[in-house]
Amino acid sequence: MRIVLLGAPGSGKGTQAKLLVEKYKIPQMSTGDLLRAEVAAGTDLGKKAKAAMDSGQLVTDDIVLGMIQARLAKPDAKNGFILDGFPRNIPQAQALDAMLARLGQPLQLALLVDVDTDVLMKRLTGRRTCGSCGAIYNIHFSAPKTSNKCDKCGGSLTHRSDDNEQTVGKRLAVYQQQTAPLANYYKAQGKLRTVRGVGTVSAIFKNATDIIESQIRPLADVMSKI
Ligand code: AP5
């Protein structure tokens, strides 16, 4: 399964990606997570990316494309992947198509998680993430049982530095300008499907997996009979 998850900041891409990883046993590739790891490790790449991330702008394409190319070359990408937060603009989408064409593994589905803008600010400013296992919580919608402790592993929960009102406002504007046009890019390829991202996480997941299986499984079945 080779899937891109599209959607505004806070639409629930990361939340759904983690459930898809568990169900389909394919890796999540989040450019946001990869970049935050570089920033935390203090690498040159992280230093270059930090200013853009702190101000809610996109990191330059050359940095992100290099990271994704290296990630796709790892052995666990052979059976498929869920791209989360990449591509973010048309040049990144074109570069991804070229990379996957070279690997002989074209993208099968671009799944857009659709959420109204007025919900996103509360979701993002209320988000808390486990620093140990990466589990995602929300102080308004899905709070942990004990304040600031992960229910799953007991790790400490952190508040992302770009989840403040000012930076979220910028991220949402950048999304509208640069990332939202990707819906038409994938629609023109016949690969775009949309799942409504409002309601319970489990109901959205059920709808997402129904779409994935109707789009990808029949293709896999046809290929296996050839
Ligand atoms: P990135 O980390 O990709 O952030 P993002 O796209 O802004 O997306 P988020 O992770 O904020 O949201 P999400 O959709 O994953 O939501 P989540 O599931 O956590 O990027 C960060 C920065 O890195 C960018 O600004 C940029 O600078 C840089 N960057 C990254 N990729 C790049 C690229 N390709 N090119 C250039 N620069 C790049 O959910 C959010 C909250 O909502 C959580 O609290 C969750 O619990 C809650 N929630 C989820 N679902 C529901 C629900 N159904 N009901 C109620 N609450 C819910």
Image: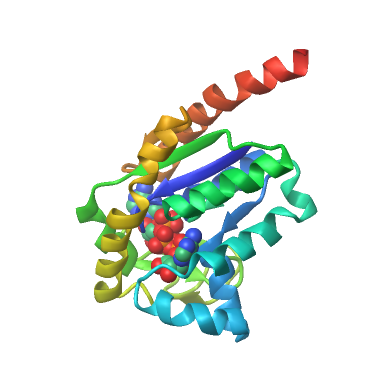
Looking at the image, is 160 positioned above or below residue 225?
A: below
- What count of labels does the image hold? 0
Instruction: Locate the C terminus and report the quarter of the image it occupies.
Output: top right
- In front of the other: 175 or 147: 175
- State which quadrant residue 133 falls in: bottom right
x, y percentage for residue 115? 29, 46
Q: Can you see residue 159?
A: no
Q: Observer-nearest residue: 198 or 72?
A: 72
Q: Image check: 144 left or right of 123?
A: right
Residue 34 on image: x %, y %:
59, 67
Q: Residue at x 35, y 72 (%)?
A: 56
| Residue 59, position as x, y percentages in the image | 46, 70
Q: Please tell me in which quadrant of the rendered image residue 64 appears.
A: bottom right
Q: Quadrant of the N terminus?
A: top right
Residue reaching furthest top? 225
Residue at 34%, 56% in the rendered image: 178
Residue 21's x, y, as percent? 62, 47
Q: Nearer the viewer, residue 30 or 146?
A: 30
